[in-house]
Amino acid sequence: MSLQIYNTMSRRQEEFISQQPGKVKMYVCGPTVYDYIHIGNARPAIFFDVVRRYLEAVGYEVDYLVNFTDVDDKLIRKAEQLGTTVPEVAERFIEAFYEDTERLGVRRATRNPRVMEHIPQIVAFIGELVDKGAAYPSGGDVYFRTKSFAAYGQLSHQNLEELQLGIRIGIDERKEDPQDFVLWKGAKPGEISWESPWGAGRPGWHIECSAMAREYLGDTLDIHGGGHDLQFPHHECECAQSESLTGKPLSHYWMHNGFINIDNQKMSKSLGNGITVNELLKRIKPEAIRYFMLSGHYRAPLNFSDDTVEQALGSVERIANCRVNLEHRLGAVDPDGSGAAGWHARLDAPVGALRYEPQTGDEPLDGRLRGLRDRFAAKLDDDFNTPDAITVWFELVAEANALLKLPVAPAPALRALLGLMDVMDGVLGLLPRADEAAGLLDAEVDALIAERTQARADKNWKRADEIRDLLAEQGILLEDTPQGIRWRRK
């Protein structure tokens, strides 16, 4: 089965064919960096990270851009509140974005272009639109002439008359038409601004993405993504600007993720029910948050509650514990460590990782593992169906648990199961990261357990109790098994 993507533009699933074989140009609208990101921002960050990982896992090189809007009204107000500058606000919350998303297992994009670093490109883009008659200056601002683009409304599937009802606008005598939107905003006293042919000012929201996408990825993208709320007006306006200038489609595939609800209510400022990722990570493990985000289909709404997150934590711990058990058993049957070395959860999926071939020496088992690999890929080929892909992963867990119940588990079979688990994790990123482990490193825990075992043999009960207490403080649970003491984190 080839990869099928639901295209918002056509409202149907289409076979994915990149413009250049083996390469994908992908742009996703990032946050406005005036505060910590909320869980609504986290959903596209996590989901499109999976899209990028999967494309790489099946063999594509992905040039992936996520922009930062680092100047707009919200940043200006935030700077005034904090008594600082817009660039300082932006820098503070860009770093916070990296910290939060990296804890959620999100790999950094190929590039994260910032608006303030691309003013010349934005000004040039606007100038070309003015020269073409698709934009006009008025009163220090520059507006896009919406009626000059006959296809306006193609993405949101509404005509201009219908769209007029959905545009939050007041009467503005500077506009030729109420539906025209701003490309360049004339400077107000005391606000950050840049010089342009139309006077000092700053870019409008929509033009920023068009200019930065064109700068790095050319006239036409393979995939353009973002939240459902960006379809109109943001992405609709991007289409109008870019396609008026180039005469080419801005993107061949448009993807939009659904909303996050909080306890069955829409997340909104008016309800005051927004939750920042920064606060959430203080009480919930990052892998549980990531699991929750991928437990529903990306186009469907998700309901966040204590119960749903608790369920997510239990599910992801089942996967993590299975992997720990496989590593432990492999270490037992391969005591010199050569067999277990290198089997650690990865943050990325190497290009072509899903070509993984299990080699256990047991053909029926190899066949079952290949079947799981292929069904995992098939679920993701079906418009990135992550919940069904997770179900396949649990089938792998069941296969592993059955092997672990045997009196003797062959090392090749253990390695093959770990290998396939790493391939799946390389795409979905659900296993705990090494730097998220509490306190002690794995090697330190092993050394302490060995020391405690020796202390007990020497009847040094005081030292044995000290080590037991230290491990308990670090959330380390000890379990007796036929192969000796094994441990796991709470």
Image (cartoon, grey):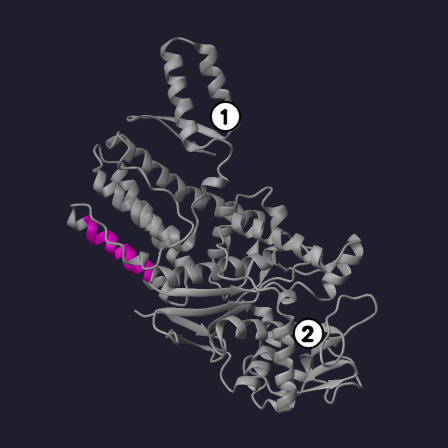
Determine crowd level at label 1: few under 14, some 14-19, many 20+ residues with C-alpha closer than 10 A. Answer: some
Q: Along the polypeptide, which appears first: circle 2 or circle 1?
A: 2
Is residue 448 inside the magenta stretch? no
In the figure, 270 relative to 156: above or below?
A: above
Percent from the top left, x then y, of residue 369?
Answer: 25, 52
Instruction: Give the prevailing secondary structure in the magenta stretch.
Output: helix
Q: Position of residue 133 (x, y in %)?
A: 64, 91
Q: Residue 80 in the image: state x and y as whole percent.
A: 80, 58
Rendered residue at 57%/86% (across/down): 244
| Vertical arrangement, residue 209 with respect to residue 245, above or below | above
In this rendering, the count of numbered labels is 2
Query: From what the image shows, is residue 251 above or below residue 263?
Result: below
User: Between residues 287 and 132, which one lies in front from this camera angle?
Assistant: 132
Whether residue 134 can be seen here: no
State the mark number for residue 472: 1
Helix, strand or loop at disc 2? loop
In the image, which residues are magenta? 365-377
Asked if 471 appears above or below 459 in the picture, the reply is below
* Residue with the most extreme right position: 189
Residue at image position (42%, 54%) is 428
Secondary structure beneath disc 1?
Answer: helix
**Camera-nearest label, 2 or 1:** 2
User: In the shown orientation, is residue 84 left or right of residue 418?
Assistant: right
Residue tagged 2:
204
Quadrant the N terminus occupies: bottom left
Quadrant in which residue 186 is drawn: bottom right
Amino acid bearing label 1:
Ala
